[in-house]
Amino acid sequence: MSLIADLDALLAEAQGLLAAAADSATVEALRAKYIGRKGILPEMMGRLAGLTPAEKPEAGKAVNRAKTGVQAALDAAVERLGGGARAGHAVDVTLPGRQRTLGRKHPITLVLDDTVAIFRRMGFLVAEGPEIETVYNNFDALNTPDDHPSRDPQDTFYFPDGRILRTQTSPVQIRVMQTTKPPIRIVCPGRVFRRDTPDATHGMNFHQIEGLYVDRNVTLADLKGTMAEFARELCGADAKIRFRPHFFPFTEPSVECDFSCIICGGKGCRVCKQSGWLEIAGAGMVNPKVFTSCGIDPEEWTGYAFGFGIERIAMIRYAINDLRLLYENDVRFLHQF
């Protein structure tokens, strides 16, 4: 049968040429010639259609024998020449390796790490909790009234089973006070969620870090000292703070804490709206009702709490004018940090 003879001749020819090939380019050319998409072997396989049913079995075996033999000869040639012929290019092992660019920390991560490190140096431990919380831990235990606007579904993400995406990291403080006897000194970093329309200063998810210190005879002066030390560590030795009266349902008395502007040094600029001060944190003495809801005797123990947004500090620290830049993952922007 002429087809079987042609196949055996093709195999012998291919094996001879591949055994004598001196470089990978020759091997690649022979591969294309014999078993490539438009090679001799595929063309011969097309001749099977013209054979009789009695001739096809033997011819099929010859095709498989030729295909296997040519491939084995190619593999042997590739191995003999150092393995570079498959791709059609020799591998030059003397070339230097490719430089791989290392990733960098996101600006939010940088600020969060620095903030946690500062409080760790002051003796605070890090506590974490779930992002899906109960209404009790997020609102009730924190003395938030039933008619408070933050409970409204327009402000808070509710699940069908009644649980919510936490609106603050304060529930972590509740969980710690429910399971740990005072004294307590913790910071609670994490992601929180609110139904805000995204713009230059607001987002539906952002990061907070809150702190809690519970012990005997804790006063507002202790809170002021802690915040002052944090301001100096974060913004420099000349940083100053001030307290302004405010209201939060979970602290009494409550204050807003301002840091002297790190951009202008307190002289007044566009960032601080010419005031020389930047609003950084909300704080205050823990409301006795919060202690009672956690099983802590407010007659024996006192404490302070504070909280602030990480994105807010990142925007001030790096002079970022739009919160959304922190979440768009634009490499050109992130490469600056």
Image (spheres, grey):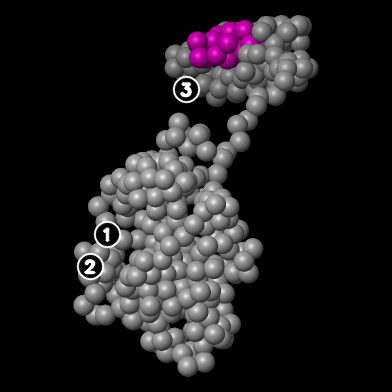
The answer to whether residue 163 of the structure is visible from this angle is no
Which secondary structure class fits the magenta region best? helix
Tell me the SS state at disc 1.
loop
| Left or right placement of residue 197 versus residue 276 in this view | left
Disc 3: which residue:
53
Regarding residue 149, the answer to whether it shows in the image is yes
The amino acid pointed to by label 2 is: Pro
Q: Is residue 255 left or right of residue 177?
A: left
Residue 29 falls within the magenta-colored stretch: yes
User: Where is residue 142 shown, x and y percent of the image?
Assistant: 37, 79
Q: For the residue carrying disc 2, how many other residues have a C-alpha within 10 Å: few (<14), some (14-19), or many (20+)?
A: few
Disc 2: which residue? 153
Residue 325 horizontal/vertical position (percent): 38, 41
Q: Are marks 1 and 2 in contact (CB under 8 Å)?
A: yes
- Image x and y of residue 297, in percent: 48, 92
Q: In the shown orientation, is residue 280 left or right of residue 181?
A: left
Seen from the viewer's position, the closer of residues 241 and 17 is 241
Instruction: Please give the label number shown on residue 248.
Output: none
Residue drawn at (70%, 24%), measured in percent from left and top?
A: 97
Q: Label 3 crowding class (10 Å Cα cut-off): few <14, some 14-19, many 20+? A: few
**Label 2 element class:** loop
Looking at marks 1 and 2 on the same chain, the residue that comes earlier in the sequence is marked by 2
* Residue type at tag 3: Pro
First to last magenta residue range: 27-44
Label at residue 195: 1
Q: Nearer the viewer, residue 161 or 109?
A: 109
Mark pair 3, 1: CA separation? 74 Å
